[in-house]
């Protein structure tokens, strides 16, 4: 295992989990009847958008370069 890469990526994965939790909680508060498919769509969009945004702002760790 490449422990240096894991140490660089861990904060980003933790941030993704926190952001996803906040987004899905807010979605449930705004739209209580949101189906699981909507929630999965939000998770997929966040999973694709976060690394792209981090690269755009120049904050990406080396493994994502």
Image (cartoon, rainbow, N blue to C red):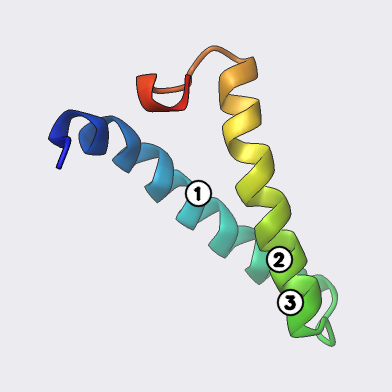
| Residue linked to disc 3 | 28
- At horizontal 73% and vertical 52% (from top left) the residue drawn is 45
Above or below, 15 against 4 in this view is below
25 lies left or right of 27: left
Relative height, residue 55 to residue 23 (above, below): above
Please provide percent x and percent y for residue 49.
68, 39
Q: Are marks 1 and 3 in contact (CB under 8 Å)?
A: no
Name which residue lies at 21% across and 34% down.
Answer: 7
Label 1, on which residue?
16
The alpha-carbon separation of the residues under discs 1 and 3 comes to 18 Å
Could you tell which of marks 1 and 3 lies nearer the N-terminus?
A: 1
Q: Position of residue 63 (x, y in %)?
A: 38, 26
Say left or right for 20 vs 30: left
Measured Cα–Cα span from mark 3 to mark 2: 5 Å
Q: Quadrant of residue 34?
A: bottom right
Position of 61 compared to 53: left or right? left
Q: Do tag 3 and tag 2 residues touch (Cβ < 8 Å)?
A: yes
Q: What residue does disc 2 label?
A: 26
Residue 58 quadrant: top right
Cα separation between marks 2 and 1: 15 Å
Q: Secondary structure at mark 1?
A: helix
State which tag comes first along the sequence, 2 or 1.
1
> Residue 20: percent from the left, percent from the top?
58, 58
């Amino acid at each position: 295992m490449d422990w240096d890469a894991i140490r660089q990526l861990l904060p980003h994965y933790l941030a993704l989990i926190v952001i996803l939790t906040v987004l899905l909680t807010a979605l449930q508060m705004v739209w209580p009847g949101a189906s699981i498919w909507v929630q999965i769509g939000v998770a997929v969009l966040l999973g694709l958008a976060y690394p792209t945004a981090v690269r755009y702002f120049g904050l990406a760790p080396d493994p994502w370069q």
